[in-house]
Amino acid sequence: MGVKPLKNEDLKICPVCEDKLSPGISSWHFFCNFCKHELSDLDLVVNPETPTAVLIDETKRELGLKKVRQENFEKLLTKLMYYCHRRGKVLDVGCAHGWFVELAAANFEVVGIEPDPVFFTEKPNGYLNIRQGFFPESIEENEIFQIIIFNDVFEHLADPNS
């Protein structure tokens, strides 16, 4: 299954709740007043050579985000312990730096999937169970997870219904 870029005519209905979308802060930005989902009609690009990606300083981004993300992940893990038995299998789609994978590994068998090659070329993720690729293509045949996590991912999906 390939990623289908959205066209302007596809952006009239929210792919999450099917309510009407409203124009956002730019001509490419749309949002749903009902469920608060946001999306764009920008082309899907995961390539560190693009001008947008070059402008992102991952070291500064990590410094600014890591503490708040880890605090949120700790809260999420507390909830997950209620829904999934210890050592259950958890999938983190769009795991980026692997912070959730690293924290969750203490209690779960956890796998991360990340499409951005920057996280594989600039950071050693070898000690974490992280696969480079897209969901669901990176899932092995007959692989089963008790819980699948999408932390800050839906806004990046060209076709979330798929």
Image (cartoon, rainbow, N blue to C red):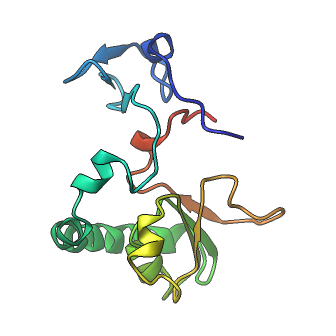
Q: For the C terminus, which image quadrant?
A: top right
Q: Looking at the image, which is closer to me, 85 or 142?
A: 142
What residue occupies the far right of the structure in this picture?
142
Q: Residue at x 44, y 14 (%)?
A: 8
Q: How far across and down, in percent of the image, does residue 161 sit? A: 59, 33
Q: Is 36 above or below relative to 66?
A: above
Q: How far across and down, in percent of the image, does residue 128 sit? A: 52, 83
Q: Residue at x 64, y 77 (%)?
A: 88
Q: Is 105 above or below relative to 20?
A: below
Q: Residue at x 77, y 66 (%)?
A: 143
Q: Looking at the image, which is closer to me, 64 or 5?
A: 5
Q: How far across and down, in percent of the image, does residue 73 sit? A: 35, 70
Q: How far across and down, in percent of the image, does residue 32 sit? A: 34, 23
Q: Residue at x 16, y 67 (%)?
A: 64
Q: Is 25 above or below relative to 78?
A: above
Q: For the N terminus, which image quadrant?
A: top right
